[in-house]
Image: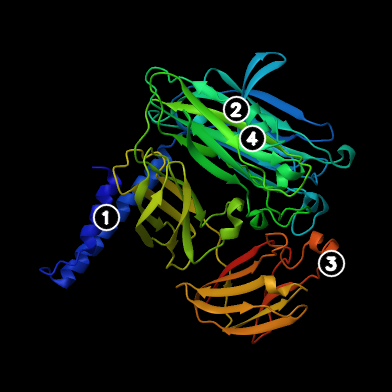
Amino acid sequence: MPFFIWLNLLWYYADMNLSNHNMTKLFDKNRRFKILAFSLLIFCIHSAIIAQDTVKVIFFQDSNIQQFRGVEWHRIAKKIPKGNYSKAILQIDLGCATYGCCAWDYTYKGFFSKKINDTSYVDAEVARLITPYSSFMRKGRYGYDSSWSHPYVYDVTDYLPLLKGDSIFYSASTGGWDDKGKFGFKHTVTLYLIKGDTIRNPVNVLPAFQDNYRYQGSIQIDSMINPFRFKLRPGENYAKLRTIITGHEQEGEFSPINFHVKLNGKAIYQKRLWKTDCDQNPIQPQSGTWIFSRTNWCPGEKVNEIEVHLADLKIEGENEVEIYFGKIETESKEIHAVYSIESHVITYRYKDSFDVALIDIVSPSRNPNYRMHNPSCSKIKLLVKNEGLMATDSVFIAGIDVGTGLEFRYTNKIDIEPYQSTIIEIENNYLDLSSVGIGITEGRNNLNKNNDHLQSSGIITPKHTAKQLVFEIATTNDSSVNKLNLTNGQGTVVFKKDYLNNNTTYADTVNVSPGCYQLELTDYDKNYQCGDGLSFWYSSRVMKKTSGIFKIYDAKSGKILKVFNPDFGGRINYEFRIE
C-alpha cells in the first residue's frame, strides 16, 4: 500500500468516534496515532530530502551579458557527471552588470545546445524571461541598489534527453540598448540534477516550432507555420507539446490574441495569450510601464511554458501537431506584431495515470517570486500540478511546522486537468510558521514519490501590540478605484472601506484583538485595465493624476507602524499579528 494512503488511513482511524470505546482511552489512542503518523511523515520528508543526491553544475557566475551591441550569444560548455537523474532544475539569477543596471525590458533566452562546428550550434530553448525596468536599481531608489538580483527557476526535466555525454553547452541569447551601452545585466546560471528513478523521464525531445512569426492577419500567420509531423519510436506511447511564446512590437505586446493547438486534425487546446497580473509583479516598483497587461509576459518575470496533453496519439503511423492563431484584438489599423515561439514535442515510454506534484510552497516562503504572498500568518499556500495522464479529483496533504511541531492536514476534492496548476490554500491556525515540511498525494494510487515532498522556510510575520489601529489614506483625484479590506485569521471581515472623495485624507480607527490579520488595499483603473497604485509616473505625467499615501499607526501612541510605497500597482497585501 502506498505510504501516504496508509498514513491517511491512520488519521482516519485516529479520528473515528468509536462509541464502544472509553473516551479517555480514545483520546490517548487518537493522540498516539497522530504522533505516529506525523513521525512517519517527517521521517519520510527528511528522508526524501536527504536521499535526493543533487549534482550542481554552474555554467556562468556573475557574468556580464548585455550592453549596446544588439543581440548577443553567450555560450559555455560544462561537464555533466554521469548518473541517473529523476529531475533537473535550472536557476538563472539576474543582477546588475558591473557597469550598472539597464533601464529596459529585454528578452533573455536560455538554451541547451549541441555544437556542430566552431560556428554552428543546434539550440533548444528551455528558459525565457523578460528583464525588469531596472533604473531604480542603478540609482538606488525604493530600497534597491546595484547589488540587486532576482532568481528565475525552471523545471527542465523534459530536457534530460539532451543532457547526455561528457559535456553540455548552455547558451544565452540577449539583446537591447540603453544609453549607448553604459548599462546592462549579469547572470549566474546553475543546473541542479537530482539523482533518482528515471522510469517516468522523457526519452526524446523533438523541435517542432522555432521562429519569430510576423502577424499581418490570422490567415497569413497561420500559413507561415507549417504543421509538425512525427512518429513515436518503438516503446514510446505518450507525448506532450511544450511551448514558450511571447508577443512583441506595439500590437504584439499590448493586444490579446488566441492561441490554438490541433492534434491529427482535432482541436485540443485554446488559450488567450494575455497576462493581466503584471500590476502585481514580484519586482515592484519598476521604472517603466511595468503595470500594463501584455501578451503572455510581464517585465521582470519568467515566461511560463504552455504544456498541452497529446492524448489521442497514433502509436503506429504519423502524428501531426498544428498551432494557429485567432484574430488579434486591437482597433489599430496598422498592426505591428511579432510572436516569438519555441515549441517541442516531448516523448515518453511511461507516464503515470495519476500523479499530483507538489511544485512549490508559496507560503510560508522566502522566495522573492512570492513576495505578494509573504510574510503570512493566515494561510499555507501550495502550488500543485497534475503531472498525470488523467484528471485528478482529490488531494491529500499533510505537514508539520518543523520549529514548533504543530501539525496540519488537508483533504479535499479538487479537479485538475493534465498539466494544469493551481494554488491550494490551507487555513493556518498557528502562531508563525518558521519552517514547514509538507507531503502530498492524490486520493488514488499515486506511484511517483519523487515530486511529493518539500520543505520551506518563511519570514516571521510583523507583530504589533496596538489595541486600535488607524488606517490613513490620502486619496488621488481618482479615488473610486481604491478599496480597503481587513480580515481576521478566521476569514471574517473586520473592516472595509470604499474611498469616494478625491484628494481627501481619510483616517479610520479600527479596534483589534490578539490574532492574525490580513490587510488588502486594491486599485483598478478601468482606463488601463489594471492597477496603478496611489502613485505611478505615467499616470502623473500623462493622465495628470495626483499622488496619494497610505500608512498605519497606533491610535493611542500615534506611532507609525507601517508606511507603504504608493507605487504598488494593483494590490497591497500586508499580514500582521496583534499580540
- For mark 4, what is the residue? 189
Residue type beneath disc 3: Lys
Q: Spot the residue most to the top.
A: 117
Mark earlier in primary sequence (1, 4): 1
Residue at 46% over, 41% down:
419
Foreground pick, 118 / 495: 495
Q: Secondary structure at mark 3?
A: loop
Residue type beneath disc 4: Val
Residue type beneath disc 1: Leu
Foreground pick, 434 / 251: 251
Q: Measured from the top left, where is residue 344 in percent x and y?
A: 55, 28
Q: State how far apart marks 2 and 3 are (Cα).
A: 45 Å
- Residue 541 in sight here: yes
Q: Secondary structure at mark 1?
A: helix
Mark earlier in primary sequence (3, 4): 4
Q: Are marks 4 and 2 in contact (CB under 8 Å)?
A: no
- For mark 2, what is the residue? 209
Looking at the rendering, in which quadrant would you find the N terminus?
A: top left
Residue at 61% over, 31% down:
342
Residue at 51% over, 24% down:
205
Q: Measured from the top left, where is residue 50 in percent x and y?
A: 42, 40
Q: Is residue 295 left or right of residue 404?
A: right
Counting other residues with Cα less than 10 Å from the Cα at mark 3, is it few (<14), some (14-19), or many (20 or more)?
few
